[in-house]
Image (cartoon, rainbow, N blue to C red):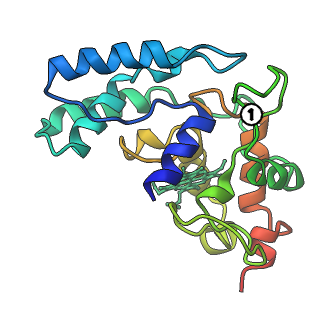
Amino acid sequence: MKPITLALAGVLGFATPLAWAGNADLDAKFKELVDRSFKTTGIAQKERMIQLDFQKLCSALEAGEKVDPKKIEELRQAQEQTIRWPSDGKFLGNWKEGEKIAQSGRGLTWTDNPDTVNGGGCYNCHQMDQKELSYGNIGPSLSGYGKLRGNSEEVLKYAWRQIWNSKSFNLCSSMPRFGDAGILTEQQIKDVMGYLFDPESPVNKNHK
Ligand code: HEC
């Protein structure tokens, strides 16, 4: 599971969770190593290597350090503040566009032009269409998502929030912050939502 997560972290550009917690000397050496080894190339900025506050905390947790649960909750609440709801109140876009986004892992690497349209790479972690042969299983299967859950406002909001910023539910979720980190646009998230919820989408149509 690890290598896939880390490779993906590289592609999508969120900070790699490396745990050197508690050793200032090693910490300084590591920072120096990163500084020497990485450089900004094209759209891949070196700043991506700097851990955000919640990423630091999750690394500490992974390293087995004791972390005050209040701190975890505080940072989770801060992630919740990042959620932006669809500006026109409409959650669902075009499922056909959404399918392309779910299947594409392109974007944000140093070989991509700045105008490359980013993909969501959902298949790297989720089964979505039962007819699809190849998919990752870091996340739960999303096959039949709308068929099984319906499309009440509560369900739509839950899925939107998960896609916009998964850390607003589970601070140390491995799912990228598609909206908050600017990986996908609002329209792209609507299209991916269409892919999850439209009865005509293969996510629901192929679900047996
Ligand atoms: C790096 C792996 C990864 C990628 C890529 C990923 N997810 Fe997830 N996703 C997860 C994990 C893990 C969960 C389980 C909850 C958690 O830990 O946040 C999840 C949960 C979800 C859920 C909530 C399921 C439920 O009902 O509880 C939805 C919806 C979802 N993902 C949609 C997507 C979509 C759409 C994409 C592509 C735009 C995507 N995910 C890409 C890892 C991923």
Please indicate whether residue 12 sits to the left or right of residue 184 in the image. Answer: left
Q: Quadrant of the C terminus?
A: bottom right
Image coordinates for residue 36, horizontal then vertical, percent: 46, 13
Image coordinates for residue 121, horizontal then vertical, percent: 69, 49
Quarter of the image holding residue 70?
Answer: top left
Q: Quadrant of the N terminus?
A: bottom left
Tell me: residue 99, above or below residue 78.
Answer: below
Residue highlighted by disc 1? 107
Please indicate whether residue 25 sits to the left or right of residue 105 in the image. Answer: left
Along the line of sight, the residue nearer the viewer: 204 or 65: 65
Along the line of sight, the residue nearer the viewer: 70 or 54: 54
Residue at point 62% right, 66% down? 142
Tell me: residue 32, above or below residue 131.
Answer: above
Image coordinates for residue 102, horizontal then vertical, percent: 74, 52
Question: In the image, is the residue at mark 1 within 8 Å of ligand 1 by its beta carbon?
Answer: no
Quarter of the image holding residue 131?
Answer: bottom right
Given the image, on which type of amino acid does mark 1 rest? Gly
Tell me: residue 147, above or below residue 176.
Answer: below
Residue 178: tell me if it is visible: no
Please indicate whether residue 159 sits to the left or right of residue 49 in the image. Answer: right
Image coordinates for residue 191, horizontal then vertical, percent: 79, 46
Along the line of sight, the residue nearer the viewer: 164 or 32: 32
Residue at point 69% right, 30% down? 109
Q: Residue furthest bottom?
A: 208
Tell me: residue 51, above or below residue 17.
Answer: above
Residue 116: tell me if it is visible: yes
Along the line of sight, the residue nearer the viewer: 62 or 199: 62
Q: Secondary structure at mark 1?
A: loop
Ligand 1: which quarter?
Answer: bottom right
Residue at point 76% right, 73% down? 132
Please indicate whether residue 109 sits to the left or right of residue 167 in the image. Answer: right
Residue at point 74% right, 34% down? 107
